[in-house]
Image: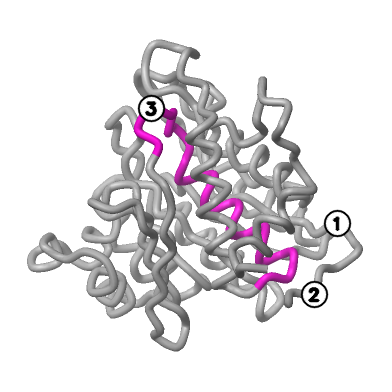
Amino acid sequence: MATISPRVPVCLSIAGSDSGGGAGIQADLKAFARCGVHGTTAITAITAQNTIAVTRVDPVAPEMVVAQIEAVASDFTLGAVKIGMVGGAAVIEAVAAALDALPDGTPIVLDPVMIAESGARLLPTDAERALLDLLLPRVTVVTPNVPEARVLAGGGAAAELDGAPLAEAVRAAGANAVVVTGGHRAEATDVLLTLDGTAVEIPGERHPDGAAHGSGCTHSSALAAHLALGFDLVEAAHAARSIAAEAVRLGLRDLGHGAGPVNVLGVGHGDVHAVPNAGRLGAASRGE
């Protein structure tokens, strides 16, 4: 049974801004609020995007990214950190150095954002090596979808892998724990490879009629939030799977002309509440 702190935990999202409000920093803050933690941010890039396309990406200076992280970390006790879009190698180097200054044991979740829902590339190919070398070994858990996991695993033979073997290949590339999310799998089952190498399947429903823009951001932020709340990794991964799936099911399909944003706060659905469900979802995932 997880021990939940009476103080509201603080989570930091290091990620890009989505002007359409569906993914990135905007999705992370909504997911943090949904889980009952206070969200803080370090913005790595500003994107001009909507539900159809990403039309421009302007990276934030690495020094400014570090200044944001330091400002937050100097004032708040961070319960967990989520890393999303990092933009390029220079920012990755700066983020890695800033992470080393955090207290030992701070949970860090990496969502290796490479391709937007619209198909736009959000991580330059020349930055992939920096992500592998500098971020992967420093984070508690990485949460790629299947295409991202195959890139992290080095491509080649990994292009045929799925499930636990794919998670193990990502682990071999330098990761600690790995969650390969189920959105691109034949069955909508996440696969968690824990720190000790145990594979845990996290099944759930697929919602093909939902809206999925921001689902990866929502999943990784919910995972970070539950680690900050005191849940262990398996419990947090179950809760994140449930929250992300519900956000897709309730997704705002009629907003914009492309892939609609997820709806983690249940806007327009009176049966969904932000804070109280966080603990209940974690408990439900354990069969309590």
Q: Which residue is mark 1?
A: 8
User: At 67% across and 80% down in the image, what residue appears?
Assistant: 104
State which tag comes first along the sequence, 2 or 3. Answer: 2
Q: Which residue is mark 3?
A: 209
Q: Residue furthest right?
A: 6
Q: Which residue is rendered at x = 56% and y = 26% of the image?
A: 21
Task: Specify few, some or many for label 2: CA neighbours under 10 Å numbering under 14, 14-19, or 20 or more.
Answer: few
Q: Position of residue 130 (x, y in %)?
A: 35, 62
In front of the other: label 3 or label 1? 3
Which residue type does callout 1 highlight?
Val
Residue 225 to residue 288: above or below: above
Region of the chain picked out in magenta, as a range: 207-231
Determine the residue positioned at 38% across, 56% down.
181
Q: In the visual, does 1 lie left or right of 91?
A: right
Residue at 68% x, 54% y is: 12
Position of 27 compared to 271: left or right? Answer: left
Q: Are marks 1 and 2 in contact (CB under 8 Å)?
A: no
Q: Earlier in the sequence, mark 3 or mark 1?
A: 1
Residue 3 image label: 2
Left or right for 93, reference 99 = left
Find residue 29 and name its label: none
- Asked if 54 appears above or below 23 in the picture, the reply is above
Residue furthest front as drawn:
288
Image quarter where the N terminus lies is bottom right
In reply to whether residue 210 is colored magenta, the answer given is yes
